[in-house]
Every structure is written in structure tokens, then in C-alpha cells.
Image (spheres, grey):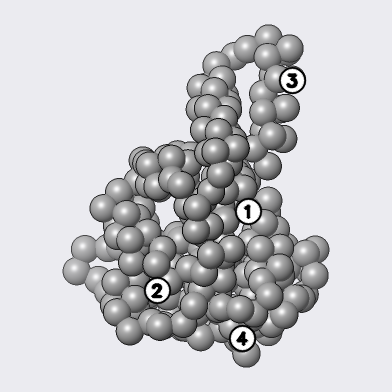
């Protein structure tokens, strides 16, 4: 499926991902060269998995490891009632015809990481969003990502856990460059050592993001709104 076909398909799949974020995941997967695999932490019912799967199929058909215990999101949880999203996930990826390059791992991120020994070219982290869980995902999977590979995090604007992990370990790190923000998804390229110029740009982008977030909460004059749009363009 191309971008338009993927968008039309995932409109009927439950999940919390904007079209802009989906397209970004599509192109990140498409650009993978095959030096490593693709990993997704938090697949839910397959919305982001399908974007990534179709992107990979339009590129070098890099295999995707979709990791999720499939016990549902917090919105799904009901007292004394088990939730399982795996069957719906399987149906959705089969209907999207991406199941041939997706390897589902019905495990927690921590369980999957223990014996995962494949190099990773692109990872999308969208699991449990409390700080300690996002930080654990980062600590577990960062060493497995190749230099030159991409780490992406969902919900980095509104939710404190992803936001803090990205602020502390991406923007302020000496091992990331080319940081970009699409809606609430932040992604960056891992490197052995970034340059002083890279670090300056990372802090500059972080400052712009902070200004944009603050300004978005206010009713501001048109010239300020125009400036805000320029900031968004810079972030992307």
C-alpha cells in the first residue's frame, strides 16, 4: 500500500496516531537499508504497525518485530476482566497484507529485550507511558540500536514520561543528532559522538519546541501565530 491507501486502511483501526505521524513512520521504515531490523514497542491493534509495515514493504522489506503483551491500554482495562488485543492485531495486519514481514512477540518490552540479539536500524517506542517504563524501554533498547539508526518516541508533547525521557536522553545527549518532531512523535539518529554543532542544534530545537508548546496554550496575535508556524516547520 502507498501512503494514501495506508491512511484509508488505518482509519478503521483503533489507535492514537495522527496521519502525519503515520507518514513519518512509513518513510523511516522505507529508508531502512536492511543493516538491522525494525522494532516496535507497543503495537496495540496494529495502527502504527501497519504504517511501518507498508513503509518497509515499499523499501527494502526489512523485518519488523512488533512487541506487545496485548493486555490492552489503560482505557481497555476493566476490573476483574482480562483484555487481549492479539487476535484483533493479527486480523488487522493480515488484512493489511503486512503480516509476512512482521514478527509479533507477545511479551513485555523487558521480556523481549532479554534474548533479543539482532541489530536494530529503527525502533518506535510507544509502550507504557509512565516515566519509569519509558526510561526502562530506552535503557533496554538503546544499546541494540546501530549507529546511524533511528529511535522514535510517541506522545512526547502531552505525556510527562515520554517528554522527560526525550528531554533528558535525546536532546541533551551526545549520541543523537538530526532530531525532528512530527506532531507528538520525536525521532533522532543515533551516532557514536555528535558534534558541537549537533549539540547546539539539539538545544535550539528543544528551545523552539518549548516556546511553541507554551504559545499554543495562549490566544495570541496573528504575527505570533505566523512565527509559531515557522517554528513548527523548523521542528519538522
Q: Quadrant of residue 68?
A: bottom left
For the residues labelled 1 and 2, the Cα–Cα distance comes to: 20 Å
Is label 2 in contact with label 4 (beta carbons under 8 Å)?
Answer: no
Identify residue for label 4: 101
- Residue 166 in sight here: no
- Camera-nearest residue between 201 and 83: 201
**Furthest residue in direction top, as rendered:** 221
Labels 4 and 1: the sequence-earlier one: 1
Identify residue for label 2: 68
Labels 2 and 3: the sequence-earlier one: 2
Above or below, 226 relative to 3: above
- Camera-nearest residue between 22 and 31: 31
Q: Which mark is residue 21?
A: 1
Identify residue for label 3: 226
- Residue 4 in sight here: yes
Query: Residue 96, percent across and down?
Result: 67, 79
Please tell me whether mark 4 sits on a helix, a strand or a loop: helix
For the residues labelled 3 and 4, the Cα–Cα distance comes to: 43 Å
For the residues labelled 2 and 4, the Cα–Cα distance comes to: 16 Å
Labels 3 and 4: the sequence-earlier one: 4
Query: Residue 35, percent across and down?
Result: 61, 78
Amino acid at each position: 500500500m502507498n501512503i494514501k491507501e495506508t491512511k484509508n486502511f488505518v482509519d478503521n483501526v483503533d489507535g492514537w496516531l495522527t496521519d502525519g505521524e503515520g507518514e513519518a513512520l512509513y518513510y523511516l521504515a522505507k529508508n531502512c537499508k536492511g543493516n538491522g531490523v525494525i522494532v516496535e514497542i507497543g503495537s496495540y491493534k496494529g495502527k502504527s504497525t501497519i504504517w511501518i509495515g507498508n513503509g518497509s514493504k515499499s523499501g527494502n522489506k526489512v523485518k519488523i518485530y512488533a512487541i506487545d503483551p496485548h493486555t490492552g491500554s489503560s482505557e481497555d482495562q476493566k476490573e476483574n476482566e482480562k483484555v487481549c488485543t492479539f487476535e484483533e492485531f493479527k486480523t488487522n495486519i493480515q488484512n493489511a497484507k503486512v503480516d509476512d514481514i512482521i514478527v509479533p512477540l507477545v511479551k513485555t518490552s523487558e521480556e523481549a529485550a532479554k534474548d533479543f540479539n539482532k541489530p536494530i536500524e529503527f525502533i518506535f517506542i510507544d509502550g507504557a507511558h509512565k516515566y519509569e517504563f519509558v526510561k526502562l524501554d530506552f535503557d533496554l533498547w538503546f544499546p541494540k540500536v546501530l549507529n546511524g539508526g533511528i529511535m522514535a518516541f510517541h506522545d512526547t508533547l502531552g505525556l510527562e514520561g515520554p517528554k522527560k525521557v526525550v528531554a533528558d536522553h535525546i536532546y541533551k545527549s551526545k549520541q543523537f543528532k538530526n532530531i525532528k518532531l512530527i506532531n507528538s512523535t520525536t525521532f533522532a539518529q543515533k551516532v557514536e559522538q555528535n558534534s558541537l554543532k549537533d549539540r547546539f542544534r539539539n538545544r535550539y530545537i528543544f528551545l523552539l519546541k518549548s516556546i511553541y508548546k507554551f504559545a499554543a496554550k495562549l490566544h495570541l496575535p496573528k504575527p505570533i501565530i505566523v512565527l509559531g508556524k515557522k517554528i513548527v516547520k523548523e521542528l519538522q
